[in-house]
């Protein structure tokens, strides 16, 4: 692969894609607004708003060995394909495991049923899965199944995470030091986290090899309790993890998964049994290589310390909320 166009490229995953591609000698162009941050060193940024009709004029008519699109807006994906499908040798669409209708069956693979597609308009976050399915269908229709990869990413972790989900536990244990930390009592819950750097490396390798079809790009399935325990060990935590029953957490308005007043990565069972245990067989067959959870946690802790353990976060409990809940639990 000599030339790569990233539709995006200045946010978290996009910047990592550009960084790795440049490092491997690829001529990388990023078409993005540029409001999420700087482009990776060595990549070319074309500032552009994908809602504008003429946004692709500067990149149309060039031979792109590969295009990678990270959008979840059907209108943006459609307009990109209309302008660039004829110029692209291969198209990678970064989708999501949120496309699946069933969240209850552990081990489900890429053949599992999808939610109903949304193929036009601008989606809201409540329509995220439907919009991703619609985007997948647009890509396949325009590029054909033999020139497109639908990379259904699972939970992404690693340094620089703007969602603050995966980094919550190691940073909370580090900031709590010897104080108590509130933890969901969820011994049967599984979690899959793929490091953003491993995800980017996989996507670039697949683009270079022109891999096709849908693929779940997920982390190794490990017990949620192991993630919590490893986070505490990585942080040098010497306090006590106080476990609360999921029903108690729900009764006290603690949210699952992400967002304010949440305990990230925790999900109720059995209705979300599949979210952390989808099949990774096809991704492994295509060459996905994953670093250890311990290695990712160590790098995430260093990143969290650099960004400030006491900063306002996008996900998790504040320390005040946590102390209040711990007092109520006692």
Image: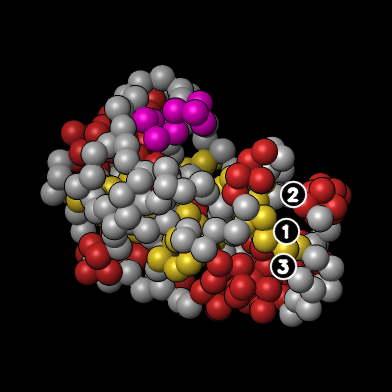
Count neighbours of disc 3 (C-alpha within 10 A) and say few if under 14, some if 14 to 19, many if 20 or more: some
* Residue 282 figure quarter: bottom left
* In this picture, residue 36 sits left or right of residue 71: right
Query: Horizontal and vertical percent for residue 27?
Result: 40, 61
User: Which label number is shown at residue 182?
Assistant: 1
Count neighbours of disc 2 (C-alpha within 10 A) and say few if under 14, some if 14 to 19, many if 20 or more: many
Q: Is residue 245 above or below residue 169?
A: above
Q: Is residue 304 above or below residue 142?
A: below
Q: Main secondary structure of the magenta part?
A: helix
Q: Is residue 287 above or below residue 126?
A: below
Position of the N terminus, as image quadrant, is bottom left
- Indicate the secondary structure of the residue bearing disc 2: loop
| Residue drawn at the location 15% of the way across and 41% of the way down | 144
Q: What is the span of residues highlighted in magenta in the rendered image?
A: 124-131
| Residue drawn at the location 35% of the way across and 65% of the way down | 202
N-terminal label among 2 and 1 = 1
Q: Which residue is mark 2?
A: 317
Task: Give the Cα distance between marks 2 and 3.
Answer: 15 Å
Q: Is residue 129 magenta?
A: yes
Residue contact between numbered discs 2 and 1, judged by CB atoms under 8 Å: yes
N-terminal label among 3 and 1 = 1
User: Which label number is shown at residue 241?
Assistant: 3
Task: Give the Cα distance between marks 2 and 1.
Answer: 9 Å
| Residue drawn at the location 73% of the way across and 58% of the way down | 182
Query: Horizontal and vertical percent for residue 150?
Result: 28, 48
Q: Does residue 58 appear anywhere in the picture? A: no
Q: Nearer the viewer, residue 224 or 193?
A: 224
* In this picture, residue 251 sits left or right of residue 145: right
Image mark count: 3
Which of discs 2 and 3 lies nearer the camera? The answer is 3
């Amino acid at each position: 692969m000599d030339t790569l166009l990233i539709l995006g490229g200045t946010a978290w995953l996009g910047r990592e894609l550009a960084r790795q591609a440049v490092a491997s000698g690829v001529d990388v162009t990023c078409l993005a607004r540029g409001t999420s941050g700087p482009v990776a060193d060595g990549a070319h940024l074309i500032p552009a708003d994908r809602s504008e009709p003429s946004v692709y004029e500067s990149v149309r008519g060039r031979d792109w060995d590969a295009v990678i699109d990270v959008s979840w807006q059907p209108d943006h994906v459609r307009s990109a394909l209309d302008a660039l499908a004829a110029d692209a040798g291969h198209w990678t669409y970064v989708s999501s495991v949120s496309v699946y209708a069933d969240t209850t069956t552990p081990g489900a693979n890429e053949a599992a049923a999808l939610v109903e597609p949304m193929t036009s308009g601008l989606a809201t976050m409540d329509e995220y899965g439907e919009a991703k399915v619609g985007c997948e269908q647009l890509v396949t229709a325009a590029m054909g199944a033999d020139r497109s990869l639908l990379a259904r990413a699972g939970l992404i972790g690693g340094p620089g995470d703007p969602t603050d989900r995966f980094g919550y536990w190691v940073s909370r244990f580090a900031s709590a030091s010897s104080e108590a930390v509130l933890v969901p009592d969820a011994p049967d819950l599984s979690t899959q986290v793929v490091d953003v750097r491993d995800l980017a490396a996989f996507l670039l390798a697949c683009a270079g090899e022109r891999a096709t079809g849908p693929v779940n790009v997920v982390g190794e399935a490990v017990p949620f309790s192991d993630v919590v325990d490893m986070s505490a060990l990585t942080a040098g935590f010497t306090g006590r993890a106080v476990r609360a029953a999921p029903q108690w957490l729900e009764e006290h308005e603690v949210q699952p998964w992400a967002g304010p007043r949440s305990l990230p990565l925790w999900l109720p069972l059995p209705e979300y049994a599949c979210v952390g245990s989808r099949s990774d067989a096809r991704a492994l067959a295509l060459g996905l290589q994953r670093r250890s959870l311990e290695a990712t946690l160590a790098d995430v802790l260093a990143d969290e310390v650099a960004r400030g353990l006491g900063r306002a976060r996008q996900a998790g409990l504040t320390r005040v909320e946590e102390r209040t809940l711990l007092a109520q639990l006692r």
